[in-house]
Image: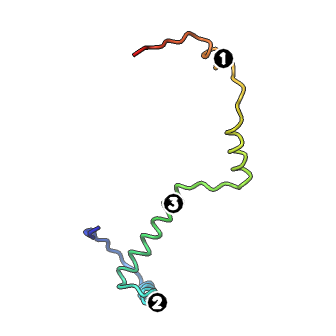
């Protein structure tokens, strides 16, 4: 995908040194490439975390088990099921 967008931001001198050093250690092609890779990875993680709900295993097992249980119909459901049905034939 062609890179057509531009982001600009300011960093402190310490942050600049840290980022440049990490870029070298990681063997990135450039500081920009290092920053983009790190930010994209973090963005994907933030989105994944926001879309994921983690629950304890026993709670999850209770949820799954409840899906297999057929509840007893209540009065409103029985009333609706006992009503007249209109069927249209094509």
Please say if the residues under marks 2 and 1 sit with CB atoms less than 8 Å apart: no
* Disc number placed over residue 48 in the picture, else none: 3
Q: x, y percentage for residue 35?
A: 40, 78
Quote the CA–CA distance across marks 3 and 1: 42 Å
Q: Quadrant of the N terminus?
A: bottom left
Say which residue label 1 marks.
78
Sequence-first disc among 2 and 3: 2
- 48 to the left or right of 75: left
Above/below status of 50 relative to 75: below
Could you tell me how far apart the alpha carbons at marks 2 and 1 are, in whole angstroms?
Answer: 69 Å
Which of the two discs, 3 and 1, labels the residue nearer the N terminus?
3
Secondary structure at badge 2 equals: helix
Callout in the foreground (3, 1): 1
Q: Nearer the viewer, residue 19 or 69?
A: 69
Say left or right for 70 vs 18: right
Disc 2 to disc 3, how far (Cα)?
Answer: 27 Å
As drawn, the label of residue 25 is 2
**Which sits earlier in the primary sequence, circle 2 or circle 1?**
2
**Label placed on residue 10:** none
């Amino acid at each position: 995908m062609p890179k057509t967008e531009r982001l600009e931001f300011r960093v402190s001198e310490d942050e600049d040194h840290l980022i440049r050093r990490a870029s070298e250690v990681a063997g990135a092609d450039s500081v920009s490439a290092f920053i983009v890779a790190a930010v994209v990875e973090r963005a994907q993680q933030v989105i994944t975390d926001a879309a994921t709900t983690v629950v304890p295993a026993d709670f999850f097992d209770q949820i799954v088990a409840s899906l297999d249980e057929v509840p007893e119909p209540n009065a409103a459901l029985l009333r609706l099921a006992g009503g007249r049905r209109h069927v249209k034939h094509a």
